[in-house]
Image: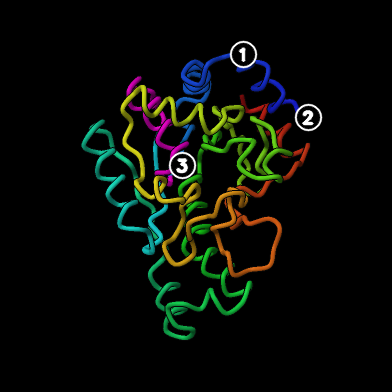
Amino acid sequence: MSKVVQQIKQQTEGLKPVEALSLLAKLFPGKIIFSTSFGWEDQVISHIIFANNLPIKVFTLETGRLFPETYYTWNRTLEMYGKPIHAYYPQHDAVERMVSTKGPSSFYESVENRKECCGIRKLEPLKRALAGNEVWITGIRADQSANREEMHNVEWDEGNQLVKFHPIFDWTLNDVKQFIKDNNVPYNPLHDKGFPSIGCAPCTRAVQPGEDFRAGRWWWEDQSKKECGLHATGTHEEAEETFFEKK
């Protein structure tokens, strides 16, 4: 484990999510950011940040293909907390070029096309959102899928050159639901219709009992790890040591 990741892991060990986020906000003032897609887990973290007035920027990726229920949850969150949620859109010229040449549903035709769409609508805007930051907060939980169980609550994101921290990594889904109930947190109504993981409308369906958490994402593809690349991880000791020395 690299030096910076190990240090943050030690400093946040045993802390409640609000305590850990408060500490990181002090350690990385103006350099800490949280990404929300308005799912259960992200709504929990948004509540913690907004209700406690933590100086952590909250943003979302507005792909242009979200569910109406997601926009509803977005509006409800703004109404309840009165805090900004910064929207990052894809570059219009890239979207126009892709749709003009391949049509609005090219992602169904091949994995390559789907990854192209994710790259334009999600990965490029994410790069812009994360630029200049040093800590990225996410709502990832260990039991969401098999490959996420291999992750840790503090990680180094090689592609984006920053630390990722998952404050509710060890929570169960029941923990999340109970927190939402206890704190009257607004959540996406699609969760009550069999959607545990919610992305773009054309690429997400409800899951059946016994199916994997992410079985409803890109369901037409034959693959074992249904990730779009937002949370790809890696290690690079030299890069992390340089990052740590700056602190």
Image quarter where the N terminus lies is: top right
User: What residue lies at 51% left-to-right and 21% top-to-bottom?
Assistant: 17
Image quarter where the C terminus lies is: top right
Q: Which mark is residue 164?
A: none
Which mark sits nearer the N-terminus, 1 or 3? 1
- Which class describes the residues within 10 Å of circle 1: few (<14), some (14-19), or many (20+)? few
Q: Which residue is mark 3?
A: 35
**What kind of element bears circle 1?**
loop
Q: Amino acid at mark 3?
A: Ser
Q: Is residue 66 above or below residue 40?
A: below
User: What residue lies at 41% left-to-right and 60% top-to-bottom?
Assistant: 63
Q: Is residue 7 above or below residue 190?
A: above
User: What residue lies at 41% left-to-right and 65% top-to-bottom?
Assistant: 91
Residue 186 pos. (x, y %): 31, 36
Q: Amino acid at mark 2?
A: Met
Residues at marks 1 and 3, CA–CA distance in whole angstroms: 23 Å
Nearer the observer, 228 or 220 = 220
Q: Which residue is mark 2?
A: 1
**What kind of element bears circle 3?**
strand
> Is there CB contact under 8 Å for labels 1 and 3?
no
Residue 89 pos. (x, y %): 38, 58
**What kind of element bears circle 2?**
loop
